Image: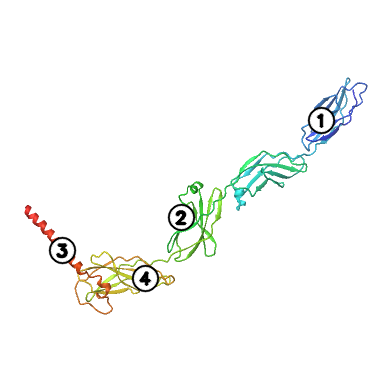
């Protein structure tokens, strides 16, 4: 048989290839008929990879940065010769494998970037095999732009366009070079959060402010499930939330009269929370005086009476006046007979057996605005003078007073009353006469 082969010579080639070559051993007088090359990751895994008469063979598709071994044996007509020494080799490192898993993380990671969630995408991927050389970074391709990041598996893409679809792929880089790109993925940025609506005061009261915003009939708001946050500035100049929900109105209660309050509003949708509006300031109104109870009427000597009513204390430093009105007989409108700060008034020149109805209201005289705020009139108090006496003089109101003259019927009114009475009697007599004639 042939002599022992010398150790094969191994040369590494690009793309996972090695070239194995060898010299012919001593043939011992007979021609070499065949060489057999065994290859494996270790001695126990050696397998026949080549047999023939050539003295060179290329092995392909080897793993990068992997350990291999081989041995050679020659054959002739007398049989096989001894194996060569076991030769070890290591393939060189190569560029990284392609990234197999690339995805876009959803809602939660964007909370770390509240200022521009509509211009961000959070990418996440798994580190590929580095093929024997540590990964140094990654190239991220967005089509028209490309960026390089360090050795990480998460990256936030910033300064993107809102509500825009991007095609993204990535490749790993090591000292050998850049590996293949991954498959494309599609990712869409969020739409822009809504702008704040304009805040208006729909109605102001002394202890409340009714605020409104936006358009409650808008189909857009309903489709987007808009949520509004209304905030009130407190005494420490801090804004506190007083309402959050889909409504377009809110009534702020338990406020102080004639006081300015500052508000701001924010809209939020599926796209996120928008910015707060500018600060709006609205003022409550002054309170009107309360309704007074029905006045008390006391008959005095002569054709006169005295009207008394309860008092209202000054309101926030503003004095309170009173307005007294009377309704005489069958008249349809009340007439004012007194306005002042006193809580009593006397009227003279009244007629016997005539109905009088008195009512009073409190009137707040605002010192800072020169405005008068009148409360509701009290229930009326009825009064009928039962006897006719000499009119009193002095400080009492008199029928000679122009205010009281208007309460007395004129001659034309008196004549009309007489005519109406005769007409009523005539109709009554006609019915009676017809009744007896039919009998």
Circle nearer the N terminus (4, 2): 2
Secondary structure found at label 2: strand
Tell which of 345 and 297 is nearer to you: 345
Image coordinates of residue 45 in percent, x first then y, are 79, 31
- Res 52 → quadrant: top right
Image coordinates of residue 233 in percent, x first then y, are 52, 62
Circle nearer the N terminus (4, 1): 1
Q: Which mark is residue 312?
A: 4
Q: Is residue 427 visible?
A: yes
Are discs 4 and 1 less than 8 Å apart at CB?
no
Q: CA distance from mark 4 to mark 2?
A: 35 Å
Q: CA distance from mark 3 to mark 1?
A: 140 Å
Are discs 3 and 1 less than 8 Å apart at CB?
no
Left or right for 99, reference 317? right
Quarter of the image with the N terminus is top right
Q: Residue furthest bottom?
A: 394
Q: Residue at x 48, y 65 (%)?
A: 260
Secondary structure found at label 4: loop
Image coordinates of residue 94 in percent, x first then y, are 77, 39
Looking at the image, residue 374 lies above or below residue 194:
below
Are discs 2 and 1 less than 8 Å apart at CB?
no
Left or right for 228, reference 298? right
Circle nearer the N terminus (4, 3): 4
Q: Is residue 310 visible?
A: no
Q: CA distance from mark 4 to mark 1?
A: 114 Å
Judging by the rendered image, the residue that carries numbered circle 3 is 421
């Amino acid at each position: 048989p042939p002599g022992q082969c010398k150790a094969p010579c191994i040369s590494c080639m690009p793309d996972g290839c090695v070239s194995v070559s060898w010299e012919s051993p001593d043939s011992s007088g007979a021609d070499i008929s065949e060489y057999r090359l065994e290859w494996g990751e270790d001695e126990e895994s050696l397998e026949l990879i080549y047999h023939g008469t050539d003295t060179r063979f290329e092995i392909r598709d080897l793993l990068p940065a992997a350990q291999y071994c081989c041995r050679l044996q020659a054959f002739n007509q007398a049989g096989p010769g001894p194996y060569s020494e076991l030769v070890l080799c290591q393939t060189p490192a190569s560029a990284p494998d392609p990234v197999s898993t690339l995805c876009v993380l959803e809602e939660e990671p964007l909370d770390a970037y509240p200022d521009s969630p509509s211009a961000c995408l959070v990418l996440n991927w798994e580190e590929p095999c580095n093929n024997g050389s540590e990964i140094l970074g990654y190239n991220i391709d967005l089509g028209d732009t490309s960026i390089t990041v360090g050795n990480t598996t998460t990256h936030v893409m910033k300064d993107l366009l809102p509500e825009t679809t991007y095609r993204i792929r990535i490749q790993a880089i090591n000292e050998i070079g850049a590996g293949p790109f991954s498959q494309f993925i599609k990712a869409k940025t969020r739409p822009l959060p809504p702008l704040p609506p304009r805040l208006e005061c729909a109605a102001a009261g002394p202890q409340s402010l009714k605020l409104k915003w936006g358009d409650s009939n808008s189909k857009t708001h309903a489709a987007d499930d808009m949520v509004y946050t209304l905030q009130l500035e407190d005494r420490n100049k801090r804004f506190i939330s007083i309402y959050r929900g889909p409504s377009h109105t809110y009534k702020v209660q338990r406020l102080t009269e004639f006081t300015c309050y500052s508000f701001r509003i924010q809209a939020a949708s599926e796209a996120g929370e928008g910015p707060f509006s500018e600060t709006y300031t609205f003022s409550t109104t002054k309170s009107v005086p309360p309704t007074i109870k029905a006045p008390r009427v006391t008959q005095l000597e002569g054709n006169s009476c005295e009207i008394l009513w309860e008092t209202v204390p000054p309101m926030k430093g503003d004095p309170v006046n009173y307005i007294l009105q009377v309704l005489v007989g069958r008249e349809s409108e009340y007439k004012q007979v007194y306005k002042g700060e006193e809580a009593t008034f006397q009227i003279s020149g009244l007629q016997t057996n005539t109905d009088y109805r008195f009512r009073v209201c409190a009137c707040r005289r605002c010192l800072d605005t020169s405005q008068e705020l009148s409360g509701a009139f009290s229930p009326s108090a009825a009064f009928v003078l039962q006897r006719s006496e000499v009119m009193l003089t002095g400080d009492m109101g008199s029928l000679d007073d122009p205010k009281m003259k208007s309460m007395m019927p004129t001659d034309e009114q008196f004549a009309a009353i007489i005519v109406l009475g005769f007409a009523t009697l005539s109709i009554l007599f006609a019915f009676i006469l017809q009744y007896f004639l039919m009998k």
